[in-house]
Image (spheres, grey):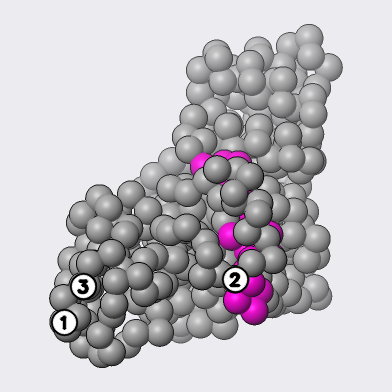
Amino acid sequence: MAGRVIDLIGKPVSLIPTPALIVETEIMEANLRRIADFFTHRPANLRPHFKSHKCVTIAKRQLAAGNAVGITCAKLSEAEVLAAGGVRDILIANQVVGEGKTARVAELAGKCRLSVAVDDETQVRELSAAMAGTGASVGILVEVDIGMGRCGVPPGERALAIARVAELSKGVEFLGLQAYEGHCITVLDPAERREKVVASMLKAVETRRLIESSGLPVQVLSGGGTGTYDMTGTMEGVDEIQAGSYALMDCYYAKRRPEFGIALSVLTTVISSNGGDHAVLDVGVKGVGAEFGVPVLADRPGDEIPFFKSEEHTTIKVGGEPLKIGDRVRLIPSHVCTTCNLHRRIFAVRDGVVEAVWPIEGSGCLE
């Protein structure tokens, strides 16, 4: 199969076997330039999030676009994939727990500049123990919960207590804080979203000031995302923005960040049709992430997807031009991150021709 895929380079999109993940490279490149340009004259930098696309080629292109200090990822296995691909500055924006995993952290820290998020002293001590005798060190970012209700400690003294333990522990280096205002992304109105974002992130900035006033230096406050990059990214005291979806986009984020083009779609084939108001595509929930709603049919505004629950099929209520068996249809997912995790490769397309085939090395990296 690998050889057959490579043979498609230079061939028209119509020859790609479906379902297939495709990216319009010109749109993606414009997205990368847009966000890099935004940070050109600002104190904050990008640390693009790998979890959105899980593709090392795209991660390197994000770095090459400029104003990026490294790559963010969600899991240890993703960090290992990035390091193997040549990325040298990696933040695991999650807690890494367990002797087996901390041993892997220690090994990885000898190959790149590695940082890890923590929200408890136990995690700091486990990492410190794993680093003993390696000659390497791992950076520590204390995660502060500013409204997500997920990982992280409350703003204030609790974060300071963990920072002090990290500062005194061997093999680890206290670098600063991590905070994510993702609970604000659901707000469609930009003014209201900005108000909620600033109020939330100020909690992290104030925690930073508390730690600094105690005598501990804070090198970095990392957080934010595509939905808030121009809000969090302009705040004093915030140093890194962990945006990821901007590169490829999806129909959910497009409503919130219309300045970025939708570069990603799932190419499908009509496998059944009554020649009128009913057609079926060859992909379902096993190939399209739909946590934020059903996918959107590209270039077919008169058609509707009444439900999206089948594993291998998408049923279309045709309201426009009838679809024939063998027709190609593109679906725009509502969630780019889970869609990319379902595929093993991306077909990079320019002007209707396959330009390259990029492996999604982080697909299935869950641990």
Q: Is residue 188 left or right of residue 10?
A: left
Give neighbour class at mark 1: few <14, some 14-19, many 20+ (Cα, 10 Å): some
- Reading the image, the residue beneath label 3 is 273
Viewer-nearest residue: 230 or 64:
64
- Reading the image, the residue beneath label 2 is 12
Give, as a three-letter code, the residue at label 1.
Asp
Q: Give whichever of discs 2 and 1 has the lower sequence position.
A: 2
Residue 10 figure quarter: bottom right
Residue 12 drawn at (x, y percent) = 60, 71
Give neighbour class at mark 3: few <14, some 14-19, many 20+ (Cα, 10 Å): some
- Reading the image, the residue beneath label 1 is 277
Q: Is residue 116 above or below residue 130?
A: below
The image quadrant where one finds the N terminus is top right
C-alpha distance separating marks 2 and 1:
29 Å
Residue 233 figure quarter: bottom right
Region rendered in magenta: 347-363
Q: Is residue 353 magenta?
A: yes
Q: Is residue 96 above or below residue 92?
A: above
Which secondary structure class fits the magenta region best? strand
Circle nearer the viewer, 1 or 3: 3
Q: Is residue 166 left or right of residue 300?
A: right
CB under 8 Å between discs 2 and 1: no
> Dot 3 lies on which element?
strand
Q: Is residue 58 above or below residue 265?
A: above
Viewer-nearest residue: 12 or 128:
12
Give, as a three-letter code, the residue at label 3.
Ser
Mark yes or no: residue 15 visible: yes
Residue at the right extreme, as displayed: 135
Give neighbour class at mark 2: few <14, some 14-19, many 20+ (Cα, 10 Å): some
Viewer-nearest residue: 112 or 282:
282
Q: Give whichever of discs 2 and 3 has the lower sequence position.
A: 2
